Image: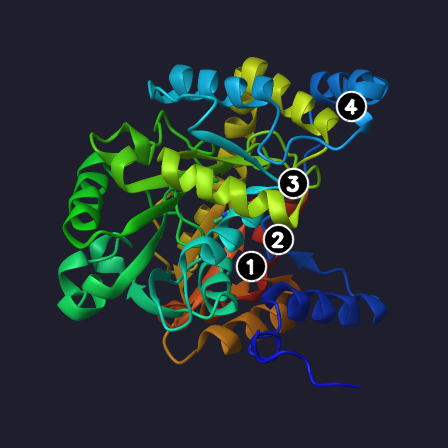
């Protein structure tokens, strides 16, 4: 058999594939493992969205190739939602493109702008697709460390002048996976000014814009004056409506970048199943109550976990958004050794922070995407089986 292409050989094993394997091994031994590992909502897609899909799937008009940039009615629904939710004006015809999940767009934007040797600015720790998408297109990532003392926001002044001048894309993601950090309007203003100065395209990943607590309302990058001149925002219905399996998302913002991404997509995929677009429209138009209920469910789970760790000596703040808790490992542990320790002592899976980049070393991530009774059981196991630590 011929060798795989170098770009494929360079892909590290997908973090969760390793964790899945470990879970399977323990399950085979009859151990009841509780996994805080993967960030995939456990709750079902709401019935009114499923009903809409059931209706749409029976219409033969939806059985043919869709438009690769999305039905105009879908793009209008996205624009209407941006107006209602963020007070951002978008032209559905030129400033919105459908995606087969936002992950698809995040990977493919690299093929639109990155030539071999080009540089992208990538957050570390971060969603792995930013760096791997960059690499697949032949580019190199300049990693922007997200430090606790900076509220897990990148420090633009720490980026060397020659790197900034050369950079093509900058990936940002707030509310943030894996740190749970949020960004202020002032931070996005700084990002827009930086992008203008160095002619960088900002790709803001807003996958968690609807997952927030305690009255906190996340900001869209596009709310900032001038944002549309320098970038786009990715979002999807995956996290707000428990629709990760449906594969439908969108990118919005700068018309030139949206057109380029659409042109690329028209050559490699043929868009998202129309029935799925119609179902997603239902969520965007009528989903406020679902989102409100989801907030209450995740907030309860969050409190159970944060309280358990804090009773053991941690001093974790309660994240204002995302369904993640990002926490430091105790003294004497690495990310990996602490994950192993928790698994051995309590049969609980946490994700080692170094899986999200070198700057994630010394941290672990907990995902709150499992039922409350399982979260409560895990919290109890942590209290019972983990030793008190002091930092
Ligand atoms: C879940 C997630 C996404 C994307 O999900 P899709 O289902 O592809 O829309 C994008 N970015 C981050 C940071 C995520 O955690």
At numbered mark 4, what does the secondary structure look like: helix, strand or loop? helix
Pointer 2 residue: 378
Q: How much space separates mark 2 and mark 3, taking CA atoms?
A: 24 Å
Which one is in front in this view, the residue at disc 4 or the one at disc 3?
4
Contact, CB < 8 Å: mark 1 with mark 2?
A: yes
Residue count near mark 2 (Cα–Cα under 10 Å), binned few <14, some 14–19, many ≥20: many
Task: Mark 4 or mark 2: name the one nearer the start of the chain.
Answer: 4
At numbered mark 3, what does the secondary structure look like: helix, strand or loop? loop
- Which corner quadrant of the image does residue 259 belong to? top left
Q: Does 194 appear above or below 281?
A: below
Q: What is the quadrant of the N terminus in the image?
A: bottom right
| Drawn side of residue 53 relative to residue 389, left or right | right
Q: How much space separates mark 4 and mark 1, taking CA atoms?
A: 49 Å
Residue count near mark 1 (Cα–Cα under 10 Å), binned few <14, some 14–19, many ≥20: many
Contact, CB < 8 Å: mark 4 with mark 3?
A: no
Pointer 4 residue: 62
Q: How much space separates mark 4 and mark 2, taking CA atoms?
A: 44 Å
Q: How much space separates mark 4 and mark 3, taking CA atoms?
A: 21 Å
Residue count near mark 3 (Cα–Cα under 10 Å), binned few <14, some 14–19, many ≥20: some
Q: Position of residue 139 (x, y in %)?
A: 41, 69
Which one is in front in this view, the residue at disc 4 or the one at disc 1?
4
Task: Mark 2 or mark 3: name the one nearer the start of the chain.
Answer: 3
Residue count near mark 4 (Cα–Cα under 10 Å), binned few <14, some 14–19, many ≥20: some
Residue plotted at (50% across, 61% down): 133
Pointer 1 residue: 382
Q: How much space separates mark 1 and mark 2, taking CA atoms?
A: 6 Å
At numbered mark 1, what does the secondary structure look like: helix, strand or loop? helix
Pointer 3 residue: 244
């Amino acid at each position: 058999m011929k060798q795989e292409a170098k770009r494929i050989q360079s892909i590290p094993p997908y973090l969760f594939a390793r964790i899945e394997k470990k879970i399977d091994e323990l399950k085979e031994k009859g151990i009841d493992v509780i996994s805080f590992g993967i960030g995939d909502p456990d709750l079902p897609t709401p019935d009114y969205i499923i009903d809409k899909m059931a209706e749409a799937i029976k219409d033969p008009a939806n059985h043919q190739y869709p438009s690769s940039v999305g039905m105009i009615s879908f793009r209008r629904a996205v624009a209407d939602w941006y107006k209602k939710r963020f007070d951002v004006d978008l032209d559905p015809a030129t400033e919105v493109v459908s995606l087969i999940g936002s992950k698809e767009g995040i990977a493919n934007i690299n093929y639109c702008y990155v030539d071999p040797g080009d540089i992208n600015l990538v957050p570390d720790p971060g969603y792995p697709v930013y760096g791997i998408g960059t690499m697949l297109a032949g580019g190199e990532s300049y990693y922007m460390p997200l430090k606790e003392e900076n509220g897990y926001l990148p420090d633009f002044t720490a980026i060397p002048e020659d790197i900034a001048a050369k950079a093509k894309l900058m990936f940002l993601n707030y509310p943030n996976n894996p740190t749970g950090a949020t960004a202020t309007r002032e931070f996005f203003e700084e990002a827009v000014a930086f992008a203008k100065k160095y002619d960088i395209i900002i790709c803001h990943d807003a996958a968690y814009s609807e997952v927030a607590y305690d009255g906190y309302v996340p900001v869209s990058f596009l709310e900032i004056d001038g944002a549309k001149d320098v970038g786009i925002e990715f979002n999807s219905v995956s996290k707000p409506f428990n629709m990760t399996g449906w594969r439908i998302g969108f990118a919005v913002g700068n018309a030139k970048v949206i057109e380029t991404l659409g042109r690329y997509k028209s050559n490699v995929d043929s868009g998202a199943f129309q029935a799925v677009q119609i179902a997603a429209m239902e969520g965007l138009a009528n989903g406020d109550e679902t989102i409100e209920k989801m907030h209450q469910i995740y907030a309860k789970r969050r409190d159970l976990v944060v309280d358990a760790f804090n009773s053991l000596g941690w001093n974790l703040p309660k994240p204002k958004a995302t369904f993640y808790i990002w926490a430091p490992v105790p003294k004497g542990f690495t990310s990996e050794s602490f994950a192993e320790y928790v698994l051995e002592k309590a049969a609980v899976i946490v994700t080692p922070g170094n899986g999200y980049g070198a700057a994630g070393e010394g941290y672990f991530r907990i995902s709150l995407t499992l039922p409350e009774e399982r979260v409560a059981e895990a919290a109890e196991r942590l209290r019972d089986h983990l030793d008190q630590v002091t930092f």
